Image (cartoon, grey):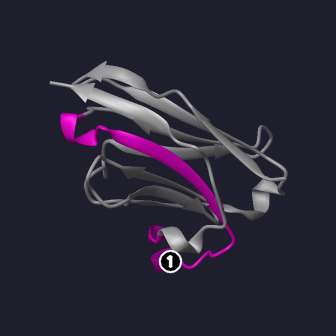
């Protein structure tokens, strides 16, 4: 049974930082492309970042502020978030998939497994 468990969310002031973690189990982690998405109340799910084949990809709204990384030995993917803004407030989800096409990594349907999400709230 595949499980993705996010952690590290919380409340932070604007300009602050958070580091999200996503621990995976039940899959051959190194084979999977890993992504982060977020969804704010009343908004559609938004692509945040992905890691696949040694390359990283970012949504325009987070480029230069967020960094995705992974540790295959720990079956964990991370999202380092700096210079946080109130508009970054959302539930953040990690996802795992076997579609390695860069354009497809930005699309939620390309991923096979999802975590339950972790809330990030940025106060102004």
Residue 90 placement: quadrant: top left
Residue at left offset 45%, top offset 55%: 49
- Category of crowding for the residue at label 1, using alpha-carbon neighbours closer than 10 angstroms: few (below 14), some (14–19), many (at least 20): few
View extreme (front): residue: 42
Q: Which residues are magenta?
A: 85-107
Residue assigned mark 1 = 104
Residue 34, position in %: x, y? 61, 57
Residue 28, position in %: x, y? 84, 57
Q: Seen in the image, is 58 located left or right of residue 4?
A: left
Q: Against 124, is 97 above or below?
A: below
Residue 91, position in %: x, y? 41, 42
The magenta stretch spans residue 95 = yes
Residue 25 placement: quadrant: top right
Which quadrant, please, contains the C terminus? top left
* Viewer-closest of 53 and 45: 45
Residue at left offset 57%, top offset 45%: 69
Residue at left offset 46%, top offset 28%: 9
Q: Seen in the image, is 33 located left or right of residue 48?
A: right
Q: Against 65, is 107 above or below?
A: below
Q: Against 8, is 33 above or below?
A: below
Count of labels shown?
1
């Amino acid at each position: 049974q595949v499980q993705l468990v996010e952690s590290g969310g919380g409340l932070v002031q604007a300009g602050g930082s958070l580091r999200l973690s996503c621990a995976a189990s039940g899959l051959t982690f190194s084979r999977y492309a890993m992504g982060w998405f977020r969804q704010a109340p009343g908004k559609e799910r938004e692509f945040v970042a992905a890691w696949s084949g040694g390359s990283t990809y970012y949504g325009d709204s987070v480029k230069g502020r967020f960094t995705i990384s992974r540790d295959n030995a720990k079956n964990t993917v991370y999202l380092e978030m700096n210079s946080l803004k109130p508009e970054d407030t959302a539930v953040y989800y990690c996802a795992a998939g076997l579609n390695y096409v860069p354009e497809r990594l930005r699309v939620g349907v390309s991923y096979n497994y999802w975590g339950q999400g972790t809330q990030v709230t940025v106060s102004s």
